[in-house]
Amino acid sequence: MPLTGRLREKTIDSIDSIDNLPVSIIYHSCMEKSIRDGILIASITPYFLDREFLWFQENIKEILEARKTQSFFQDNTVYLKKDGEINFSQFLRQLDEMGYERVQEVSDPGELSRRGGIVDIFPINLNYAVKIEFFGNKIEGMEKLPIVVENEKEAKERIKKKLKRQKMFMQLGALKLGDLLVHLDHGVGRFAGISYLVSSISDEKKEQDTKYYVLEYAAGDKLYIPVGLERKLSRYVGFATPKISRLSSPVWVKTKGKIKEETEKLAKELLEIYAQREITNRPYYSPDNEIDAQLVNTFPYEETPDQIQAIEDIKKDLEEKEEPMDRIVCGDVGFGKTEVALRAMIKAVNNGYQAALICPTTILASQHYQTFIKRIGDLPIRVGLLSRLQSKNEQKKIIENLKIGKFDIMIGTHRILSNDVEFKNLGLLAIDDEQRFGVRQKEKLRKIRTSLDVLSLSATPIPRTLYLAMSSLKNISIIQTPPSQRLPIKTFVKPWSKEIIKKAIIEEISRGGQVYYLHNRVETIERVKKFLEKLLPKVKFGIVHGRVGEKYLVKVMDDFSNKKIDVLIATAIIENGLDLPNVNTLIAADSARLGLSQAYQIRGRIGRSHIQASAYFLYNGNLSDIAEERLRALEEAQELGSGYRIALKDMELRGAGNILGKEQSGNINHIGLNLYCQMLSDAIEKLKS
């Protein structure tokens, strides 16, 4: 390229000498003259983003000369003159391909809006926006708009960061025909493949074959996106199949504009919440001591790389930062989140604090209590359990001892949040599956958060897109690596058959294992037990579901854990938190009633050791198309950690709801999760700058 970026001195009308004038005055004087002569619009590329506004004005003649012979400048610049002519449709198309984003109202560099024959555009090479009026293909007028760049360096940096985020959010790997994609300027369409077309954007440019992504819209409209501009595309993830409009419809730009306003409000709220936490300080935690080391040495498994990283993340939060920790550890079922939480809580105790773990169900609280007692062993740390399973007198005594510091760690249900419960010196709160708590409990947790170190555990795989969007605010550690020696679960989808049921149960019991039998209807669960007892008279069966009392529930689970029961007949209550390595066969009767993520979560209750596990998803009669698609996806994706992929829509939306709130789901459904998260990330970065 002939342009070196060296700024050359130019003569400016009505100014005799520029030697002592500030650059800003020189620049604005140049701009006023420029808009009378013509307007240069540069594409959003790193080459131009690295140039200052004044460079374009100083080198305008060289740029225009380069446009005559060099394809780079032909493809990446447009020059407009009043009363000049340019093909209006090709002009708009080139602006799209130069990276400009269509919006309802222009406010930032890199944006354009169109109202009939009027185009407002904010070129990245100018410090102000411009209105261009067309009559057909003729430029009737050009004028400067009162929308300016206050700080050139910050504006350019925001654009560069936005380009990086667009690439991160696009996720276009393994595209299939019919996949829903979102184009930043034109909305949701269906992927129709890759095409090679002869293209010619401008008169100066010679025709050549160009590779395009093809998107189909309503009424047969097609959009061709050049390979190289993929950053304007992202996968659609939403609650339901979205409405696909025609390309000329203004609905998309209006929808995107409205959601942009709402993401800016949400970003402001989130920043205010996290700003409150930064006001509160606590002493730095001390490095690990002998007790921490002993806990590490007694861990019976080898930590996965993701577990190690999560533990290190938490150590940095506690040892190197004064503001309270607020971190989410999310990972697949059985991938070791509890061990990460345990080590964090022990670290808090070693630094003179009490720690608490709050769980959504009594079963989960009881199981965590047993796990902690076993792991802590002979360490001088006192662990307590508080739930409504205990009598009032027992609860009263536990609460009294907690208040005077006789317990170092307390595990319980939302009973821990009751007004009569006081800690002597609570420092760290771990929350398991926070999304399962009610509104009141969440409000209490929100108030507690401003002064405590908080560690949240989520079995829902937080999507990569949401992680990127929230990373400026929230600390998230993702555990995606399965434990060593863990085997994929063999999954079978078959018509209901008592022969299959009988064979599966006998095979599991004969090798010393146990079975989950999922029957998700309380009304007929006793009838199922009688059927199974008749089918297998020597096998011991038990029943659990949500309508039995909590004490009975815990007793049955204890009996099952202690191998007094061979087959546990249960509703979907087993979906959450149960960790029983000896249970390695699942039989899901009438599995067509299960949602994809629910089926995946339930399947994760088995195969939690080195023993080969098997899951049988049985169905009655003919499957609906949707049910068949869900079960096929479950059967095909048997490798470890595959739930993140197979349940992408459901899981990602649950993840978004966990952090952003369910009220955002409507917005996500309109434009897709990836674009929503990109817009939220843009809003956060803009407010922080």
Image: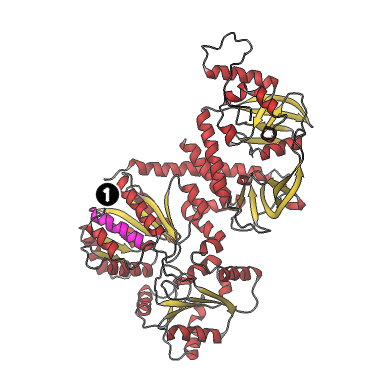
Residue ranking furthest to the top: 16
In the rendered image, residue 348, in percent from the top left (x then y), is placed at: 27, 55
**Prevailing SS of the magenta stretch:** helix
**Residue drawn at point x = 33 percent, y = 58 percent:** 417
Query: Residue 246 vs residue 410: left or right?
Result: right
| Magenta segment | 339-356
Residue annotated with mark 1: 285
**Residue drawn at point x = 49 percent, y = 80 percent:** 525
Query: Residue 608 vs residue 251: left or right?
Result: left
**Quadrant of the drawing holding the N terminus:** top right
Q: Is residue 117 magenta?
A: no
Q: Is residue 408 visible?
A: no
Q: Is residue 54 visible?
A: yes
Residue toward you, 140 or 423 = 140
Vertical comparison of 455 with 557: above or below: above
Figure disc tally: 1
**Residue drawn at point x = 68 percent, y = 54 percent:** 191
Q: Is residue 341 magenta?
A: yes
